[in-house]
Image: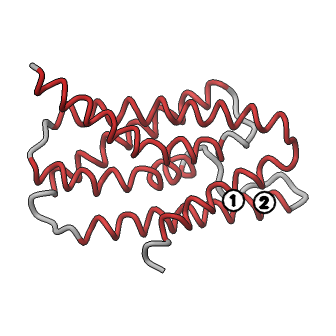
Amino acid sequence: MSEMVGEIITLMLMAAALGMDAFSVGLGMGMYKLRLRKIFEIGIVIGIFHVLMPLAGMTAGRFLSEQFGALASFIGGLLLILLGMQMIWSSLKDDDEKVITPVGFGLLFFALSVSLDSFSVGLTLGIYGAKTVLVLICFGVMATVLTWAGLLLGKKVRSWLGAYSEALGGAILLAFGIKLMAVFL
């Protein structure tokens, strides 16, 4: 029993670490004008991606090498840099048209960008034979909760900063993407 509790605590800590990028992206996305229903939806979609990506990683973990984990971090960083630059650019434009918004394909793009690192962790957990259902529950719940927290905090900051909030959100995404890419530069 204590072995199971130890594994749950370990997985929750790992899920919290992986979910921090969802929190950061949620903070940036919260700078958009979002209703509470959309915030709920975004959290659920990102949580689902944090279940699907480690599941795919755990499934592939027996077949792929450790090199793929570095590639996933690189792609995730690149996506966040592009999203951040787009948000900053669109905040400088006079019109309200956005290239990428957290709706439809844009939401899937956001969710993919923050869940790629979960894929690489899933690879490792698959190699070590972690309990799949436990991993998926921990990762999905933590990512969803942290995304909601980031979105709600971002929404609050948006009300304080007004027009500059979207540029700040873009800067957060850009900085986080650069941090992920710094390993490769």
The amino acid marked with disc number 1 is Val
Indicate left or right for 144 with 64 as reference. Answer: right
Q: Front-most of 74 and 112? A: 74
Residue lying farthest to the right in this orientation: 94
Q: Residues within 10 Å of mark 2 (few under 14, many from 20)?
A: some
Q: Secondary structure at mark 1?
A: loop
Where residue 112 sits: x, y (%)? 44, 53
Residue 166, compared with residue 23, is above or below; it is: below
Residue 1, compared with residue 28, is above or below; it is: above
**Residue hosting label 2:** 90
Q: Front-most of 21 and 64? A: 21
Where residue 46 sits: x, y (%)? 45, 40
**Residue hosting label 1:** 99
Q: Front-most of 5 and 113? A: 5
Total numbered labels: 2
Residue lying farthest to the top in this orientation: 1
The colour style of the image is secondary structure
Where residue 120 sits: x, y (%)? 28, 57
Indicate left or right for 120 with 163 as reference. Answer: left
Residue 14, compared with residue 80, is above or below; it is: above
Q: CA distance from mark 2 to mark 1?
A: 8 Å
Where residue 27 sits: x, y (%)? 63, 42
